[in-house]
Image (cartoon, rainbow, N blue to C red):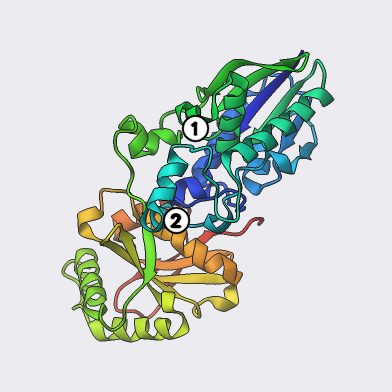
């Protein structure tokens, strides 16, 4: 009898930034690395003979929790990849909900007839995954194998193991990042031992525990943003007012707000890219602004964020990290492996937020009207 541990990858950018990642090669988040440490401890005393992984960065990185301590070499099988999301790869979930509500409804219901545009359907992905896991099991009779894959493909495989009808795929549960499922394989038959166990994670590092929809038992949804270029100059006052509100909240009893310099800067950035001022949307409502400068720090391989702003009415909805995700999606294709921004050292709320999501102080701005720290976040694949 072969024992198979199916393990979902640790928390990755798509989970945090609320973006659609199937074959898109996303990075592991800082919290994801904490999950990997917990997973390593879970498997410390479990004998494992072989480790397989899908070959995407997020699974290969998670697999290190098992293959490094046990001195094994990971074996890559592309058929263990997540469902291919085609034209939707790296699309914000908010944009998919806004532009394709009917298709997203079918996707969320796991409609067996649904297929990603220029991508893959549920049934095809499930057959691909089942075939890969069956081949692996047959290759390792009477051994124990750890298989690192993805949320949807593991879910679809479990549907086949349980004999779930295609029209009942929506009844299959979702698993946490690094959740472990155990199967046995003997005489061509898979049997389920346990499913989607995340007992090695504390609530503080569980991805699901931090998501509003999960805490509400699926009866409410998180706010998912989408983005559009600013309509300039029609939205000039929107930007000016946001800048003034952010300035006065940060620099209490500080220097007077001077709009002209900010307006000149944003017009320069818009001259380099229509996304120089990006508007974050929650459905039909404006939820925030993201200013992007393609020129400053270019020689250092960094993308610069002059302004990251969430509307005051939405500051308790944890939306700021989605703006960071949009900046990553904008600058990474330009070859930038870092993000930089400036933050007042006494802006405790912002300093805490940026620190939580991987920004560290790398310098101080000299000669400005107010003191500013230069913060940086690495967004490349290898250091």
Check if mark 1's residue and mark 2's residue have beta carbons within 8 Å. Answer: no
- Looking at the image, residue 2 lies above or below residue 288: above
Residue 69 vs residue 272, the one in the foreground: 272
- Where's the C terminus, which quadrant? bottom right
* Number of the front mark, 1 or 2: 2
Residue at point 80% right, 15% down?
142
Where residue 85 appears, x then y in whole percent? 57, 51
- Where's the N terminus, which quadrant? top right
- Looking at the image, residue 154 lies above or below residue 197: below
Would residue 33 be found to the left or right of residue 221 on screen?
Answer: right
Sequence-earlier tag: 1 or 2 = 2
Would residue 181 be found to the left or right of residue 323 on screen?
Answer: right
Residue 68 appears in the rendering? no
SS at mark 1 in the image:
loop
Where residue 355 appears, x then y in whole percent? 42, 53
SS at mark 2 in the image:
loop
Q: Which residue is mark 2?
A: 92
* Local crowd size for mark 2, using a 10 Å CA cut-off: few (<14), some (14–19), many (≥20): many
Residue 136 appears in the rendering? yes
Q: Which residue is mark 1?
A: 176
Task: Say which quarter of the image contains residue 163.
Answer: top right
- Looking at the image, residue 365 lies above or below residue 309: below
Residue 377's mark?
none
Residue 211 vs residue 89, the one in the foreground: 89
The Cα–Cα distance between marks 1 and 2, rounded to whole angstroms, is 20 Å
Residue at point 62% right, 50% down?
23
Where residue 110 appears, x then y in whole percent? 48, 37
């Amino acid at each position: 009898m072969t024992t198979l541990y199916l393990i979902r990858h640790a928390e990755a950018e798509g989970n945090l930034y609320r973006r659609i990642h199937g074959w898109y090669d996303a990075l592991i988040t800082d919290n994801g690395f904490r999950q990997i440490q917990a997973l390593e401890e879970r498997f410390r005393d479990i004998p494992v003979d072989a480790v397989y992984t899908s070959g995407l960065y997020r699974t290969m990185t998670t697999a290190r929790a098992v293959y490094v301590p046990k001195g094994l070499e990971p074996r890559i099988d592309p058929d263990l990849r997540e469902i291919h999301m085609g034209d939707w790869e790296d699309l914000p979930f908010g944009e998919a909900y806004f532009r394709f509500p009917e298709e997203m409804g079918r996707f969320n219901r796991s409609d067996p007839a649904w297929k990603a545009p220029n991508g893959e359907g549920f049934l095809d992905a499930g057959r691909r995954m089942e075939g890969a896991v069956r081949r692996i099991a047959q290759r390792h009779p009477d051994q124990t194998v750890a298989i690192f894959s993805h949320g949807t493909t593991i879910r679809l495989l479990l549907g086949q193991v349980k004999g779930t009808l295609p029209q009942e795929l929506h009844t299959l549960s979702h698993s946490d990042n690094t959740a472990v499922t155990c199967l046995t394989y003997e005489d061509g038959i898979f049997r389920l031992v346990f499913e989607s166990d995340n007992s090695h994670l504390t609530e503080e590092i569980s991805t699901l525990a931090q998501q509003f929809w999960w805490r509400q038992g699926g009866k409410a949804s998180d706010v998912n943003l989408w983005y559009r270029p600013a309509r300039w100059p029609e939205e000039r006052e929107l930007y000016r007012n946001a800048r003034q509100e952010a300035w006065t909240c940060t620099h209490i009893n500080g220097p007077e707000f001077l709009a002209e310099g900010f307006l000149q800067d944003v017009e320069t950035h818009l001259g380099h890219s229509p996304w120089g001022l990006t508007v974050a949307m929650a459905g039909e409502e404006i939820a925030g602004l993201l200013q992007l400068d393609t020129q400053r720090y270019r020689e250092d391989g960094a993308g610069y964020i002059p302004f990251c702003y969430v509307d005051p009415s939405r500051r308790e909805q944890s939306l700021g990290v989605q703006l960071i995700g949009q900046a990553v999606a904008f600058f990474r294709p330009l070859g930038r492996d870092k993000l930089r921004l400036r933050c007042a050292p006494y802006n405790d709320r912002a300093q805490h937020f940026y620190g939580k999501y991987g920004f560290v102080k790398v310098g101080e701005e000299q000669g400005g009207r107010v003191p500013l720290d230069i913060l940086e976040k690495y967004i490349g694949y290898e250091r």
